[in-house]
Amino acid sequence: MTKPVVVAVGIGSNLGEPLAQVRMAISELASIEGVTLRAVSSLYRSAPLGPQDQPHYINAVALLDCVLEPLALLDALQAIENDHGRVRRQRWGARTLDLDILLWGEAVLDLPRLTVPHPGVPERAFVLYPLAELDPELAVPGRGRVAELVAACPADDLSIVEPPPH
């Protein structure tokens, strides 16, 4: 049997009912065959990264134990996004659900459809603060430990809106 890899997945939503979308996505992550939900961060409210004429986001990070290949997990995540009505119109635009593979153990992947670690991890408070909540000692390959990165990343208007789901 394949040894599971710890995978960090970023979860975000700012359309429809963002809290409900994120909660539902967390339960759907747990239902992917070959995936075990290890931990989930608090749910955070954050300003949009791209165009500012859109609602604030609800964000969280989930840690998974995963025996799937990276592209198989990516396909499963994109299927969940599509089930939530995700439409890709504008880079960094509003969305019903966004699921990003942030870390794949300590691997560095550069595939046509997937780059890991996710290029935005080191600068994004809405990723780093939830990651630090889950495991501040996680390594971001080529960039350092989450605790070091979060110390250099201002929280800005990031705030917890809901404790971790149980």
Image (cartoon, helix red, strand yellow):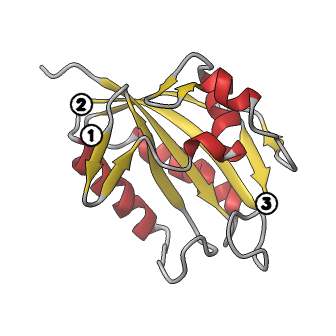
Judge whether residue 41 can be spotted in this image: no
- The residue under label 1 is 33
- Disc 3 residue crowd, few under 14, some 14–19, many 20+, Cα 10 Å: some
For marks 2 and 1 on the same chain, the one whose residue lies earlier in the sequence: 1
Q: Give me the residue at 66% from left, 47% from top.
A: 124
Quick check: 3 above or below 100?
above
For numbered disc 3, what is the local secondary structure? loop
Q: Give me the residue at 65% from left, 30% from top.
A: 149
In three-dimensional space, the C-alpha distance between marks 3 and 2, rounded to whole angstroms, equals 34 Å
Residue 47, disc: 3
- Disc 1 residue crowd, few under 14, some 14–19, many 20+, Cα 10 Å: few
Q: Looking at the rendering, in which quadrant would you find the C terminus? A: top right
Q: Quadrant of residue 145?
A: top right
Question: Residue lying furthest front in this view?
Answer: 142
Q: Is residue 133 left or right of residue 100?
A: right
Q: Quadrant of residue 33?
A: top left
Mark 2 or 1: in front is 2
Q: Is residue 132 left or right of residue 109?
A: right
